[in-house]
Image (spheres, rainbow, N blue to C red):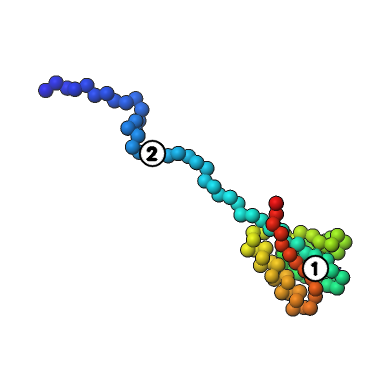
Amino acid sequence: MPLQPVMMSQYPDDDADTGVLTKTRPKTKRPPRYKVLLLNDDYTPMEFVVMVLERFFSMTHAEAFDIMLTVHKKGLAVVGVFTHEIAETKVAQVMDFAGRHQHPLQCTMEKEE
Ligand code: TYC
């Protein structure tokens, strides 16, 4: 029986039934960040604010004192930037702690642009 000529493609897998992948960049948007702000008032003792910054924002005493003075002089300061859930927790912790000590200290959050 005569052999039939067989045409082999010069390309591997030219019949293209496997390995066809279109590389598209997966949309992994990084989650929005939220600034946590501490506001000045005339009544909360400075030492209490320093304690709050040490306790809930893991600042050293020197860092906490510095940020407290910034709030005192400028009216407010960003004390940290977090995901929505963590920012919400920090605000709640500060507001609860201040309230339990009957200080009018205010802490809020806003979306970072
Ligand atoms: N202004 C306050 C005082 O003179 C101190 C203070 C600092 C209060 C920072 C709040 O977020 C604050 N006792």
Using the rendered image of the protein, determine whether residue 62 is visible from the camera's viewpoint.
no
Mark 2 residue CB less than 8 A from any atom of ligand 1: no
Picture layout, residue 27 above or below residue 68: above
User: What residue appears at the point 71 percent right and 74 percent down from the top-left corner?
Assistant: 96
User: What residue appears at the point 79 percent right and 71 percent down from the top-left corner?
Assistant: 105
Provide the secondary structure element on which disc 1 rests: helix
Q: Position of residue 112 (x, y in %)?
A: 70, 54
Q: Position of residue 33 (x, y in %)?
A: 66, 56
Q: Position of residue 97 (x, y in %)?
A: 73, 74
Residues 48 and 20: in front is 20
Query: As drawn, which residue projects farthest toward the left?
Result: 1
Mark 1 residue CB less than 8 A from any atom of ligand 1: no
Judging by the rendered image, the residue that carries numbered circle 2 is 19
**Which one is in front in this view, the residue at disc 2 or the one at disc 1?**
2
Quadrant where the N terminus is found in the figure:
top left
- The Cα–Cα distance between marks 2 and 1, rounded to whole angstroms, is 60 Å
Q: How many marks?
A: 2
Judging by the rendered image, the residue that carries numbered circle 1 is 50
Q: Position of residue 14 (x, y in %)?
A: 34, 30
Inspect the image, locate mark 1, and give the three-letter code of the amino acid beneath it: Val
Inspect the image, locate mark 2, and give the three-letter code of the amino acid beneath it: Gly
Lower sequence index among marks 2 and 1: 2
Provide the secondary structure element on which disc 2 rests: loop
